[in-house]
Amino acid sequence: MPNPPPTAGSSSLFPLISKKHEIVLFSSTAIALYGYDQGMMSLINTNSSYLQTMQISKESPIVGIIVSVYYLGCAVGAIIASWLADREGRKPSIFTCLATTAFGNILMFISGLSMNGTSPWKGGALACMLTGRVVMGLGVGGIDAVIPIYSSELASDKSRGKALAQEFQMNIFGLLMAYSINLGVTIGLGKQNQWAWRIPIIVMQIFPLVLMSVISQLPETPRWYISKERKDDARKALIHVHGKEKAERLLESIQKAQDEESNEKVGYKDMLIPGGSQYHPSMVTVMGQINQALTGYGAVSVYGPQIFELLGFQTEKAEYLTLGNYISYFLMMTFAWLSIDVFGRRKLMIWGSIGLSSSFALLTIFGGLAQSVPGVPVLAVEIPGSIVLFVATAIFGIGWLATVWLIPTEIYPSTARAQGSAISVIVWGFANFTITLLTPVGFNNLKYWLFLIFAATNAFAGWWTWRYSPESGGRSFEENQEFFDSARNDGSWVVREVDGGKFVTMPRKKKSDSESGADSESAPLLRNRR
């Protein structure tokens, strides 16, 4: 048996916390891998030893290529991991992705390694670094595809958003941790020292090694067991999480949902070809990730210091301000998990786009004053410009970071959930590949006018979300399928025209819902046992 269920008496990772919190802690740490890479590369890109080892200049487009090929690896990794998650289970897929991430990280660390200092390995250092970036992307992309599924299948309908937003707060913790380490060793060792960029890379190895060592103590999702007709294993997993009293009721509701979907065989052609049974939810997923990329915050995260330099700051101050921005980013993500299940995904994204579009328009003005208008007092630009950038980062974290990852886990049936999550990561990979590849070119040629482009793309993202993206929060997986059935019957994808606008907002809470807890998936699958 490749994926044995834990028994009811198996040991807990942390005896003082519930199994629910163990799962959130594990998933959060896994999601932090992506954030760590962003924070790690933001200062590596400007390290003199790194640039010499790779035999490139600071303005070379290869800087962007090294960053962006990672996202191509993520796209491929999502396909492989989602297939493995359906075939062998969520846990084996996650373990494989963690091992792949660790291997890619080692390749990056040893690129051009020489105890005597920087060495280009006769050109082989760049090849090794590119290979490491792609391999690590395979692992992280797979993690980003499977972890949201794993988490959502073990969370209640009323708290799925909170759980994933908490995980993405750890994503920002990873970014903050990487950047802090990077900045610390850069100050301590200098930008001419190879260990100033190698140390942040190898520290990342802590994440996959720790996660691989503890994953065996966590449950596989009962939904996956049921999908493989392993009902006894699903029962054992439920008992392990909830205790015997609740397990049978939950098992019955999951089995019922599976029986209703058992005759639906869904492939990628059903999801990506117009007219396919899951084409509509796939387009919601695709556009969600494209619109998130169009917010520009993939570029802001990776090229933070360069953004502050466009506002007129010197390099050293820009690096410190980037650290401050990341600290604020992490703290403000608290409001994301406090609000996502209250206001819903759709409302946060729409208002987030309005806030971001306005912020980037202001940054265009401040950048123009700093770069093109002589005689303007420095502080008159730097202080308000920094405040706007801090606010914009918070808006993105609250409105856009977790929402587009959560929606694909809520709008597909079980038979298509893994593929839907893979499509989400694939599009995210290609979109961010494009953005991170072109951003350095934009810095060098457009300067502060790049902000105006992001203002326009954010406006588009908000319009599309308002018109076509349904509210999936507060509903069961099955209830969200009703939107796409109604859209097909009504002949429209416009949210306000489908089913009388029912999916414009989250459903109102009913007193009976909170008291009964007995309907299919509305009962929490992970609630603390008392």
Image (spheres, rainbow, N blue to C red):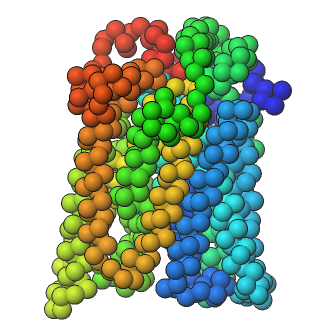
The percent coordinates of residue 320 (x first, y second) are 42, 74
Tell me which corner region of the image, top left, top right, bottom left or bottom right, holds residue 402: top left
- Is 197 situated above or below 151? below
- Who's the residue at 60% across and 25% down the image? 265
Q: Is residue 311 something one can see in this rendering?
A: yes
The part of the image, by quadrant, that contains residue 526 is top right
Q: Residue at x 59, y 8 (%)?
A: 252
Image coords of residue 197 (percent x, y) = 62, 76
Q: In front: 484, or 187?
A: 484
Left or right: 194 with respect to 430?
A: right
Q: Please indicate whether residue 78 sits to the left or right of residue 362 in the image.
A: right
Residue for point 30% across, 59% down = 457
> Which part of the image, by quadrant, shows the C terminus?
top right
Quadrant for residue 150, please give it: top right
Q: Seen in the image, is 27 located left or right of residue 509?
A: right
- Indicate left or right for 162 with 199 as reference: left
Give percent across and percent down for residue 110.
75, 73
Residue 30 seen: no
